Image: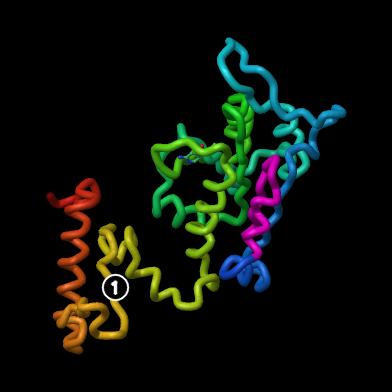
């Protein structure tokens, strides 16, 4: 899997060389390239933004640098197997299913906008050539798409075979299919008693059936309280 990041702050993505994702890069499972969008500017000030047509506050990212970056990175031939991800507060919610689908992609290009956003014609042009995903992490605004791109990257890449040491752990996580899309149950480890709080007895019983039932009940109760929208049968 090759991941490209178009951004005016490429140093944001230095962090991807650390920990699990760093190992995935070392093992050749993932190939990461961060690009400074100003590479594709030609004026003395390396300008990437301009005033919004129609007026309004702030600045909009000019289309030209993006188009020239696409030309260099992807060429002009349409290829639906290339996924262009635009992190934006106006995107569709990024969910575990999106991470799962994108974990099968061979190529993902993250376009990290700043200011008031990217000239919409960039998205229109990309949509004619590649598979475009305008995705939001949640109902809040960030200063740029970089932090969101990092979060999406981690959610996606950890699902790629060979990245996680123990793929078994994926099956019991929140939102995983094996968890019926419910929130993950509370977890405990030693000591059995800590500052007056004890590990639930059932988890110390060694009775796998009872433990599995307790965990299912905990997941459903937690989901009912925090995310009733995830409960399909109620
Ligand atoms: C500039 O990007 C954002 O502000 C952003 C991106 C993805 N999700 C969000 N909730 C915000």
**Which segment is the magenta one?**
1-17
Which residue sits at x=61%, y=69%? 24
Where's residue 30, x and y in %? Answer: 63, 63
- Say left or right for 171 vs 206: right
Q: Label 1: few (<14), some or many (≥20) within 10 Å? A: few
- Say left or right for 69 vs 119: right
User: In which quadrant will I find the N terminus?
Assistant: bottom right
Is the residue 124 above or below the residue 79 in the image?
above
Which residue sits at x=39%, y=69%? 170
Is the residue 123 above or below the residue 201 in the image?
above
Q: What count of labels does the image hold?
A: 1
Where's residue 23, x and y in %? Answer: 62, 72
Which residue sits at x=65%, y=64%? 17
Numbered disc 1: secondary structure: loop
Where's residue 8, x and y in %? Answer: 70, 40
Tell me if residue 193 is in the magenta stretch: no
Decide if ligand 1 comes within 8 Å of the CB at mark 1.
no
Which residue sits at x=46%, y=32%? 90
Residue 211 lies in what quarter of the image? bottom left
- Say left or right for 76 vs 19: right
Q: Nearer the viewer, residue 5 or 84?
A: 5
Q: Residue furthest front?
A: 195
Residue 121 lies in what quarter of the image? top right
Q: Residue furthest right?
A: 44
Where's residue 196, x and y in %? Answer: 20, 78
- Say left or right for 95 vs 38: left
Q: Nearer the viewer, residue 4 or 36?
A: 36
Residue denoted by label 1 = 187
């Amino acid at each position: 899997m090759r991941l490209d990041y178009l951004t005016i702050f490429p140093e944001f993505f230095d962090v991807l060389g650390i920990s699990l994702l760093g190992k995935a890069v070392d093992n050749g499972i993932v190939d990461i390239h961060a690009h400074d969008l100003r590479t594709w500017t030609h004026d003395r000030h390396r300008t990437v933004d301009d005033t919004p047509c129609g007026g309004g506050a702030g600045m909009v990212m000019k289309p030209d640098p993006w188009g020239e970056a696409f030309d260099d990175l992807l060429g002009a031939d349409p290829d639906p197997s290339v996924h262009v991800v635009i992190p934006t507060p106006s995107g569709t919610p990024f969910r575990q299913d999106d991470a799962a689908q994108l974990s099968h992609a061979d190529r993902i290009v993250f376009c990290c906008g700043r200011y008031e956003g990217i000239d919409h014609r960039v998205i229109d042009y990309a949509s004619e050539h590649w598979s475009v995903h305008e995705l939001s992490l949640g109902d809040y605004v960030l200063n740029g798409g970089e932090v969101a791109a990092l979060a999406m990257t981690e959610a996606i890449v950890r699902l790629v075979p060979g990245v996680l040491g123990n793929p078994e752990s994926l099956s019991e996580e929140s939102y995983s299919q094996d968890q019926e899309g419910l929130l993950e149950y509370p977890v405990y480890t030693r000591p059995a008693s800590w500052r007056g709080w004890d590990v639930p007895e059932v988890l110390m019983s060694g009775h796998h059936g009872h433990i599995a039932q307790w965990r299912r009940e905990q997941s459903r109760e937690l989901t009912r309280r925090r995310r009733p929208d995830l409960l399909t049968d109620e």
